[in-house]
Structures are given as structure tokens and as C-alpha cells.
């Protein structure tokens, strides 16, 4: 066996650098975190050729004393830890004491620093980890570190570097993410002399998001805030309709530290289930805050992965905070007969004046029937009104069916106070007659939208009171209504027994899933038996599915179970998707006016926004957009 010898210090430094310094973006991250820990309120990053030849970070933090400059570049030298107990509650971004030593081992470094109140600063030059002498230098308060010729002494690493544009984009990504983690710090990035990023540092996350991620992303965000136990969640999530093709816009911070976490990703995407299109991913900028002792940040050399002491509270806090925000965004506005939330004071007064007046004195509880009255003039004097079958109970205005010309409308009829019976003081032969019943009729105001028709037997055309034209996908809308109705029933789905059992032939993996999960299938309304040869005998199917659609539905469910989606809640939602789709009004079908009206009422009330697969159910065309198409605007 070869002799065991201790590696020379410079070789050990190169190995350590390989763990921490992967590319210029790694250098930028470590230097920026040190600047943020130093209390800087403004940080400037400058790079050339992607950061390989030149990378400079300037901050206005507390600075480094001249006698401590050489110590700062020694391995395991740090100002943030003093004892082993401190590792259990790390509250700073940098803490290992390896970053500066690792960077200096594979580059040429110049550092300039001046502490607050000092008359002059100091500078130090290092090359390949070897430090020169500390010399006085006139520099502003704070610290500036210039890294040149990265990996000059490890040429094998250079072949793994990408093009300058790609390395520069990685540095930009690091600066962007750190700017979002601390919106109270102003970040500026100069790339080959051009400013590509500048955040205001005003402490508002929304300002940082706008500056760092752009206007288009910022305009389609929902603010969220919630907590569960010791876990607090703040930030922004994207609207379901504006999903992204990748998870690149999912940005998570734990106690101010940028992290990659499968747990947080799963919690976010689970909250969007049934609301975002398949193949799309939600974006977010989420800050998760919890006690430092409940999170371990010392599980990865680059400190990008964390481990939670308790996973479930963190998952629940993110999941329910995002889900509650999405559900609140989908709820209709609490306004009478309209879901529009924009109303001027004058419009509100006019609306309030139009409300029917209720009697000042309430009539005693009771019930009576008003006899039909002769035809009377309508309030506008243009039509004859005939009241029929008018019945009232209790002390509220009642509703009657009224014939107005050739159509029937609903009217409110306000009863007069019931007259108290007189007290008999002496017998009399004169019968008392009750005062005649007077009736006031006011037509119920119609909803503030009008169905203009249907095109392609698929899209409903609707016009609202704000001169907007809406196109409504009747299948998507009805599918969502059916899905929500099915989902409200938390018990086993109602099944229908078939007079003649169905034989359904499945693929090998589907057949195995059907035999492995018979109880789960029965909860979903399918009673199946093994018929042999890859075929199952189906005796019961869900009540909301037509028998002819049952084989395809069963095969789809078994296929999802075979792919490992055996979680009952997820499997149930998948089946409900299929059931809602199969039982919904189909595009191309003839639909009655009453059905169209019911769909429009649901959609325009704001009760539904998306189909279960995340597709929008309606699209708005403003009057201006229409007039612009015809060159009127």
C-alpha cells in the first residue's frame, strides 16, 4: 500500500476551491454575501468577459481593518462564528471562512478597504493564495475586491467554462436573486461597461422585482402573506394564466438566503393544482422565515441547499398561503347583481337610489294569497301587466310571475301592513270589511350583461355594461362547474350498477394497476374484477359518466396509477378532471338558451376563472380594441 502523506497546503487550497468556486458566478455570490453581511446599503458589481478576466465588487459596508486583511484570506477565518453552538443558529449568509481563501487560491486578487471613521484605508495583493504586504491606500469607506484571471493556475478548469455570454448571464442571475433577497440594498451590475441591472434599494420587494425581473413579470403577480406556527411566508406568485415553460422563475429565500428546495417547489406547485395549464409552471418570489435553529444551512459547500428540522410546517405554510391567495383571487366580488369592482361615488349614489323601498313598518308574520287583479298599466305606461298566483310568506316583499306584453318577468310586490282587528265592544249586525289590498310592482333589474349569441357552437358572446365584449368557452366553463361540484363531495363517488357488465382490455401496466388498487377504484365508483388476459370486468361505473365513456376513463385512471400517482387525493382529482370533462357540455353541441344563461351567470359573477386544466374560460375585448380593429380609434 502506498504511503499516506499530508497534502501540501496549496494543493489542499486548490481542492477546497474546487468545492466552492465552480465559475465566476460562484465568486460573485461569495463576495456579494460577504458585502451584505458587512451591512452594505449599496453594492456595485462589474465584470468583463463573463467575469473570467475581471470581476469587481464594491460595497459601502463596515470595511476591514488593515491588520485583519491577511487574516481574512486564511482558511477557516471568519468573523461570524465563535463556538460550535453558533452552528445551530446561523443568521449570516457567509460563515464558513473558506470563500476568500478558495477564491484567492485560483486567481489574482486586489482588496481595498477602509473602516468607518478611519483617515485612510489599506490594500492587499494576493496571487495564487500567497499574500503580499498590506499598504496604505486612499479609498472610500467600505470594501472593494477585484478578482482577475480566474483559474489562471488551474488550466484544466478553463475547458469547463462556457462562453463569455453564458458566464456573464450566470453572474447576472446571481446578482438578480440576491437583489430580490434584500430589497433594502441597492444593487448595480455593470457588464462590459454597460449597466444591465440597478435596483432602488427602497426596501419594497415589489420595486426589486420590477427592476430585476422586468415589467412583464411584475405586472402578473399576486402579493401573498401568511404564516403557520413559527413559519412566515411573504412575497409574490404569478397569476395562474401566466405560467412559465420552466421552473426558472421559481425563486425561494429561507431567512434571506437563496436556496433550491424540492420541498418548497412541491408546496408551490401543489397549490396551483387544477388552476394552471399542464406543462406550465408557476413563478414566484417567496421569502420563508423561520427560527434559525429550525433550518440547517451547512449541508452544501455552496450553501444553496438547506435542511429543515420539520418539513411539514414549512410545506403547509407555503401551500396554504399560496392556495388561499389564489382562491381569494377567484372569488366573486361581494356586490349586488354585478362582479365589477370599479364604481365611482356618483354611480354608487345612483345605484343606491334605484333600490326598491321597503315598508317602514313590518307586517306581522303570516301568509295570505292575493287574488288576481284586473290588468294594470306598467310603470312606464307602455305595457299591460297581469298578476297571477301571487303568494307571500312572512314580512318581506314577495315575487310574482308577471306577463309583460309577450314575455314573462319577475316582479317584487310589497304588501301593505296588515290591519289590526278591531276590539268588539258590543254586538253589531254590520259586518266589517277589510281594506282593499294595494299592490306596487317593480320589475327586477336585469344582470349587467347581455348574451348576444353563440358562434361555432362553442363560444358564447356576451356584452357587459362597461361596453366590453366577452367570449366564453362553454365547454371549459361547464367543465369547471362540474369539477367543483364533484370535488365538494368528499365521500365515495356515487356509482351506477350496469345491467350488462363491461369488459375492458387494458395495457399491461394499466391492468396491473387495476388489480393492485381495487379498493381505490371502488372509491371512485369503479367495481372491477379480474377477467384474465389483461381484461377486467366492470360491474359499476361512476354515476356522472356515461357507460360508453367508462372504458376510456378507467384506462386513463389506471395509467396514472401505474405511473406512480397513487396518492388518493391526487388520483381523485385526476379522475374528477376526467369525469368533469366527459360530463360537460361539448364544443359543437346544441345548447339551450337557459343553459347558456346559467353558464354566463357563473362566469360573469367571477365564480370561475379557469377550467380544471388551467385554461381560461373567458376572454375580454374592450370597445377600444374592437374599434381599433375597424380603424375607428
Image (cartoon, rainbow, N blue to C red):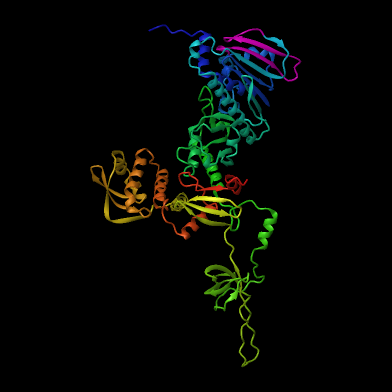
Q: Residue drawn 43% across and 8% down?
A: 4
Question: What is the x, y in percent for residue 437?
Answer: 61, 78
Regarding residue 59, the answer to whether it shows in the image is yes
- Is 430 covered by the magenta stretch? no
User: Which of 463/174 is in front?
Assistant: 463
- Is 115 covered by the magenta stretch? yes
Residue interval drawn in magenta: 104-133
- 152 above or below 303? above
- 515 above or below 362? above
- 112 above or below 464? above
Q: Residue drawn 40% across and 46% down?
A: 572
User: What is the count of numbered marks?
Assistant: 0
Image quarter of residue 293: top right
User: Which of 261/178 is in front?
Assistant: 178
Instruction: Please state, as top left, top right, bottom left or bottom right, where the N terminus lies in the image.
Output: top left
Relative side of 57 to 305, left or right:
right
Regarding residue 40, the answer to whether it shows in the image is no
Amino acid at each position: 500500500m502506498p504511503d499516506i502523506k499530508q497534502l501540501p497546503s496549496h494543493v489542499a487550497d486548490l481542492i477546497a476551491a474546487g468545492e466552492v468556486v465552480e465559475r465566476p458566478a460562484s465568486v460573485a455570490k461569495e463576495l456579494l454575501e460577504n458585502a451584505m453581511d458587512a451591512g452594505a446599503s449599496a453594492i456595485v458589481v462589474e465584470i468583463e468577459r463573463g467575469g473570467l478576466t475581471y470581476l469587481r465588487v464594491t460595497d459601502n459596508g463596515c470595511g476591514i481593518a488593515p491588520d485583519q486583511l491577511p487574516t481574512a484570506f486564511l482558511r477557516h477565518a471568519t468573523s461570524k462564528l465563535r463556538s460550535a453552538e453558533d452552528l445551530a443558529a446561523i443568521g449570516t449568509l457567509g460563515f464558513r471562512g473558506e470563500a476568500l481563501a478558495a477564491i484567492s487560491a485560483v486567481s489574482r486578487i486586489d482588496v481595498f478597504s477602509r473602516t468607518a471613521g478611519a483617515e485612510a484605508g489599506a490594500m492587499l495583493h494576493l496571487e495564487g493564495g500567497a499574500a503580499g504586504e498590506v499598504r496604505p491606500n486612499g479609498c472610500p469607506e467600505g470594501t472593494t475586491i477585484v478578482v482577475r484571471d480566474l483559474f489562471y493556475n488551474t488550466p484544466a478548469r478553463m475547458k469547463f467554462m462556457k462562453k463569455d455570454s453564458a458566464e456573464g448571464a450566470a453572474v447576472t442571475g446571481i446578482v438578480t436573486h440576491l437583489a430580490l433577497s434584500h430589497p433594502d440594498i441597492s444593487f448595480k451590475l455593470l457588464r462590459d461597461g454597460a449597466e444591465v441591472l440597478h435596483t432602488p434599494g427602497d426596501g419594497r420587494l415589489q420595486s426589486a422585482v420590477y427592476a430585476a425581473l422586468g415589467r412583464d413579470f411584475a405586472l402578473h403577480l399576486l402579493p401573498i402573506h401568511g404564516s403557520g406556527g413559527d413559519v412566515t411566508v411573504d412575497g409574490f406568485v404569478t397569476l395562474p394564466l401566466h405560467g412559465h415553460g420552466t421552473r426558472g422563475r421559481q425563486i425561494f429565500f429561507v431567512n434571506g438566503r437563496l436556496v433550491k428546495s424540492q420541498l418548497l417547489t412541491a408546496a408551490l406547485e401543489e397549490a396551483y393544482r387544477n388552476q394552471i395549464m399542464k406543462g406550465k409552471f408557476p413563478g414566484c418570489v417567496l421569502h420563508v422565515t423561520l427560527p434559525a435553529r429550525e433550518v440547517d444551512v451547512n449541508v452544501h459547500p455552496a450553501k444553496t441547499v438547506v435542511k429543515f428540522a420539520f418539513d411539514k410546517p414549512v410545506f403547509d405554510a407555503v401551500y396554504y398561503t399560496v392556495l388561499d391567495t389564489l382562491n381569494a383571487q377567484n372569488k366573486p366580488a361581494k356586490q349586488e347583481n354585478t362582479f365589477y369592482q370599479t364604481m365611482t361615488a356618483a354611480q354608487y349614489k345612483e345605484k343606491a337610489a334605484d333600490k326598491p323601498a321597503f315598508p317602514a313598518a313590518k307586517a306581522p308574520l303570516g301568509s295570505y294569497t292575493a287574488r288576481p287583479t284586473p290588468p294594470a298599466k306598467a310603470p312606464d305606461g307602455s305595457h299591460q301587466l297581469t298578476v297571477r298566483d301571487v303568494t307571500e310568506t312572512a314580512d318581506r316583499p314577495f315575487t310574482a310571475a308577471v306577463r309583460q306584453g309577450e314575455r314573462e318577468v319577475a316582479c317584487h310586490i310589497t304588501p301593505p301592513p296588515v290591519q289590526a282587528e278591531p276590539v268588539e265592544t258590543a254586538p253589531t249586525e254590520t259586518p266589517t270589511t277589510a281594506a282593499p289590498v294595494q299592490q306596487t310592482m317593480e320589475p327586477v333589474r336585469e344582470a349587467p350583461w347581455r348574451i348576444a349569441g353563440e358562434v361555432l357552437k362553442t363560444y358564447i358572446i356576451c356584452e357587459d355594461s362597461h361596453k366590453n365584449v366577452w367570449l366564453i368557452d362553454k365547454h371549459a366553463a361547464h367543465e369547471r362547474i362540474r369539477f367543483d361540484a364533484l370535488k365538494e363531495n368528499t365521500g365515495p363517488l356515487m356509482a351506477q350498477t350496469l345491467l350488462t357488465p363491461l369488459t375492458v382490455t387494458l395495457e399491461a401496466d394499466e391492468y396491473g394497476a387495476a388489480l393492485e388498487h381495487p379498493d381505490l377504484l371502488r372509491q371512485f365508483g369503479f367495481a372491477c374484477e379480474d377477467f384474465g388476459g389483461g381484461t377486467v370486468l366492470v360491474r359499476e361505473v361512476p354515476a356522472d359518466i356515461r357507460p360508453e365513456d367508462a372504458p376510456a376513463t378507467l384506462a386513463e385512471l389506471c395509467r396514472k396509477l401505474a405511473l406512480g400517482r397513487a396518492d388518493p387525493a391526487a388520483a381523485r382529482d385526476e379522475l374528477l378532471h376526467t369525469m368533469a370533462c366527459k360530463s360537460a357540455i361539448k364544443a359543437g353541441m346544441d345548447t339551450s338558451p337557459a343553459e347558456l344563461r346559467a353558464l354566463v351567470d357563473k362566469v360573469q359573477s367571477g365564480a370561475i376563472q379557469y377550467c380544471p386544466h388551467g385554461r381560461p374560460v373567458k376572454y375580454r375585448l374592450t370597445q377600444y380594441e374592437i374599434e381599433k380593429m375597424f380603424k375607428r380609434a
